[in-house]
Image (cartoon, rainbow, N blue to C red):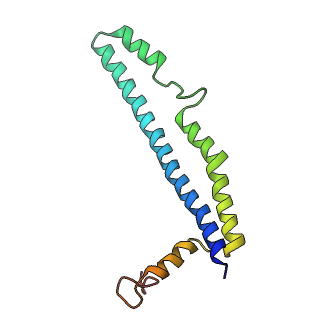
């Protein structure tokens, strides 16, 4: 059994990965919201044209609709680059750390905390789910 310092250190790596997962989710929110806004701007251009504001409709289509959000990239490319250069590396490191130091056991820090905090013998404080769960 690994010592508490190792368990705590690996737990901190896992905690950081969980925070990165949350950030990645927000990056996907950014990606989808920006894509939706681009579609809305396309619809706005159509309505401006239908309303007779053809110069503004054309300007909107040519200068903003389909535009890169940062130099050379749409949001899907930002997500891909984040995944490939950061998220995948952190995930692999967290997994390797667990494999090398904890025999691959996930959430050992939390498991130990649960064991310390639960009330033994009390319903809904069981160490593991019962049969059929």
Residue 37 location, quadrant: top left
Seen at 45% across and 43% down, the residue is 29
Quarter of the picture containing the C terminus is bottom left
Seen at 58% across and 37% down, the residue is 77
Residue 41 location, quadrant: top left
Q: How far across and how far down the image is residue 101, in percent?
A: 70, 72
Residue 98 location, quadrant: bottom right
Seen at 40% across and 35% down, the residue is 36
Q: Residue furthest front?
A: 5
Q: How far across and how far down the image is residue 78, in percent?
A: 57, 38
82 versus 42 height, above or below: below
80 versus 38 height, above or below: below
Q: Residue furthest left?
A: 51
102 to the left or right of 57: right
18 versus 23 height, above or below: below
Query: Does residue 39 appear in this view?
Result: yes
Query: Does residue 104 appear in this view?
Result: no
Q: Nearer the viewer, residue 80 or 91?
A: 91
Q: How far across and how far down the image is residue 58, in percent?
A: 41, 12
Disc tally is: 0
Q: Nearer the viewer, residue 23 or 10?
A: 10
72 versus 49 height, above or below: below
Q: Residue furthest right?
A: 100
Seen at 66% across and 74% down, the residue is 102
Quarter of the picture containing the N terminus is bottom right
């Amino acid at each position: 059994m690994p010592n508490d310092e190792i368990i705590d250190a690996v737990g901190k790596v896992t905690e950081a990965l969980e925070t990165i997962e949350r950030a990645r989710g927000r990056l996907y929110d950014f990606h989808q919201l920006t894509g939706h806004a681009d579609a809305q701007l396309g619809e706005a251009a159509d309505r401006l044209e239908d309303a007779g504001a053809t110069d503004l409709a054309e300007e909107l289509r040519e200068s903003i609709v389909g535009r890169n959000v940062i130099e050379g990239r749409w949001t899907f490319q930002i997500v891909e680059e984040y995944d490939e250069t950061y998220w995948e590396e952190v995930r692999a490191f967290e997994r390797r750390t667990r494999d090398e130091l904890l025999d691959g056991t996930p959430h050992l820090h939390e498991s130990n905390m649960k064991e310390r905090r639960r009330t033994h013998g009390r319903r809904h404080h069981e160490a593991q789910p019962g049969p059929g769960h």
